[in-house]
Amino acid sequence: MREALVFSDVQAILQEIGKIMDENKDFLCKLDGALGDGDIGLTMSNGLRAVNDHLRASTQNDIGKALMSSALEMGEAVASTMGTLMSSALFRAGKAIQGKTELSSSEVIVLFQAMVQGLKERGKANVGDKTILDSLVPAVEAMEAALNEGKSLGQIMLAATEAAEKGAKQTIEMQSRHGRAGRYLERSIGHQDPGATVGALFVKGFSDGVTARLNSVD
Amino acid sequence: MSQVVNRMKKFLNDPENVVDEMLEGLLLAHSDQLKSVRSDNRALMRADGPVIGKVAIATGGGSGHLPLFLGYVGPGMLDGVAIGNIFASPSARQMLDVTRAIHSDAGVLYIYGNYGGDVMNFDMAAELAEMEDIRVETVVATDDVASMPKGNEAGRRGVAGMFYLYKLAGAKAEQMATLDEVKRVAEKANANVRTMGVALTPCILPAVGHPTFTIGDGEMEIGMGIHGEPGIHRGTIEKAEEVAKTLVSTILQDMPIEAGHDVSVLINGLGATPLEELYVVYRSVHQLLAEQGICIYRPYIGEFATSMEMAGLSVSILKLDDELRSLLDAPFQTPFQMQK
């Protein structure tokens, strides 16, 4: 089994993330309807479509550059807060791995770390605020631990998926402190955060994509 | 009794196209002053730009507030603007496109209004511009006293008082000052301006077709934002002089001004309030300040930051010193206004 991702793998992984966002479009909108304006599913579905349309037409091998330019396409396609945050996160991910035509496990972790850092800086939120960070940060921590234990990229992503899902579920008990949902105060308790759910789906889509690609090619 | 719903009564074609059709009309009318930097017209700049050697100033934000934001592009004011949909932030790409088009070699200053989406997109645009070796600095306008209590000034919204940031920084840039100097003036203007608003009726988003909130008959809301953000007090509508007193005293509590000090005052109509009423309120503002020994220098009365057909107004007070006064005196020209 291969252990590094090349550009065509990244293309396939983002297709998988787009697919999972499409499948969960209504679910996400329903979650968002309880705490926001109910369009987060559309944002993610349309945003990933813009990314994938761009990546499909992309001819370069530089994974970082391709992610950066597709992030801008996403920002243009979906200018809502979540769209801008995801676009920012993808952009930072791309910037962090600029010049790479292959990604090792540790570089995949760098990509996710940069996403988290970008989201923190751009959204000015922290873990515990009931945002996407509450699924992505535990995912990154799980990835780092799995890498230290010498796990394969596929195993690392499985650990990340589990941690992200757990993190998203834990937002049910949290109170929103950020953005539009912050206005709901204690009424936000009892609802799973749509942003954290997006984070968990993103990691799951990434993991599924990794597994499919690395298993399919010898 | 059934509830009366105010249906939309506007001059529109397809409500979805209002921004694009507005921009086409604007460019047809003012092609001598503005030009587009994108095929979709969602980023505009001075027709005579970029001005070589001058710090370029960019702004941006959602549509639905004319003359904010694009109405301040012109000599003595701003160099470019990114235009979003109604009440929605433009994208980072639009802002980057403006930045690339207006910058010469003296750097770019972003001045805009402290709304979540705009902040994220301008920050991202600045990051992108810096990767292209364009130096960008940012000043975020935070003049709306009602939007956050004292001590939390940095979290306040930018509203009509933003005019002064544009005007003063624009004048400084026109003098070929450095980016640091232009930024300093914009920050100084922001530190010395406060705005308080009051609304009588809501606005209607064309794509929605009915008011997104209501203000009861005979009611007014002090401190309402230009997108209908909740204010700090809703009550029975009062006489103009009482309203003026509330707005002015709230501003002076937030930013004390000593007797003998000069200020500029801006009375801004929110879209559906006639000039007559703005002058009625100005009269009271003038009297109230005079009673405290504060002189008004160069008042501005008209529409500066609107919210479509919202009835209401805001009062902005800018504390002046010699530097700000001379920058205020400098000429400017935009498609909407001119000062000789």
Image: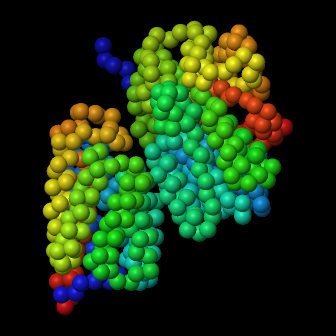
Percent of width and height locating residue A4: 28, 83
Across the whole image, how many numbered discs are drawn on residues? Answer: 0
Identify the residue at the far front of this view: A148
Is B136 displayed left or right of B51 in the figure?
left
Quadrant of the drawing holding the N terminus of chain B: top left
Q: Is residue B313 visible?
A: no
Q: Quadrant of residue B303?
A: top right
Q: Is residue B123 above or below residue B265?
A: below
Q: Residue at x 59, y 27 (%)?
A: B195
Q: Quadrant of residue A185?
A: top left
Q: Is residue B140 above or below residue A212?
A: above
Is A164 displayed left or right of B318 in the figure?
left
Q: Residue at x 41, y 38 (%)?
A: B208
Percent of width and height locating residue A109: 30, 71
Q: Is residue B179 visible?
A: yes
Percent of width and height locating residue B340: 84, 37
Please state which of residues A103 and A73 is positioned toward the viewer in this rendering.
A103
